[in-house]
Image: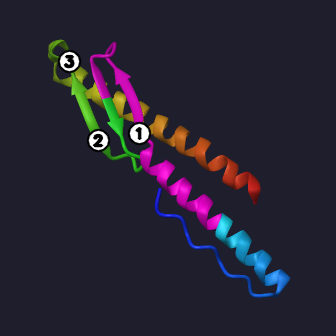
Amino acid sequence: MTTPREPVPLTGDLEIDRAIAELTAQAARIEEMTERVAEVRGHGRAANGQVEVEVLPSGALSSLRIESRAMRLGSQALTEAILEAARQAEKDAADQLAALTEPLLEEE
């Protein structure tokens, strides 16, 4: 989290002060949400756990682990296992992002 913001000085106009307070609170929630989204990692497994994939919130691959015994699957089966693990990881990341943003959407 970044450094706390300085308190916004009051204008003396109750309506403007209320709007400023609401915007400040909303900005803090957005900042927190941005940080939480950046921490999301989706995970997927295939071929009985012989292939594991991790993706970032964008869906970009961040980690791929292939056990040595997975090499016995053959190139086509290994390719399919990697793609399946990647699909699972992308869905996992998308599900986590949906769970994070759902409360924000309910506020509107």
Extreme-bottom residue of the structure: 12
Q: Nearer the viewer, residue 62 or 23?
A: 23
* Mark 2, residue position: 62
Magenta span contains residue 64: no
**What percent of the width, then of the height, locates residue 17?**
77, 80
Residue count near mark 3 (Cα–Cα under 10 Å), binned few <14, some 14–19, many ≥20: few
Q: Which mark is residue 67?
A: 3
Neighbour tally class for label 2: few under 14, some 14-19, many 20 plus, Cα within 10 Å: few
Badge 1 marks a residue whose secondary structure is loop
Q: CA distance from mark 1 to mark 2?
A: 9 Å
Name the amino acid, label 1. Arg
The residue that disc 1 covers is 41
Magenta span? 26-52
Give residue 90's quadrant in the image.
top left
Q: Amino acid at mark 3?
A: Glu
Q: How many discs appear?
A: 3
Q: Give x and y (percent) for residue 96.
A: 53, 39
- Render colour scheme: rainbow
In the picture, the disc for residue 86 is none
Residue ranking furthest to the right? 14
Q: Secondary structure at mark 2?
A: strand
Label 2 and label 3: CA atoms lie apart by 17 Å
Identify the image quadrant of the C terminus: bottom right
Instruction: Find residue 83 and report its horizontal and vertical position in percent.
Output: 32, 32
Q: Looking at the image, which residue is at 22% across and 23% down?
A: 78
Q: Position of residue 5 (x, y in %)?
A: 55, 69
Q: In the image shown, does 72 or 51 lie closer to the viewer?
A: 51
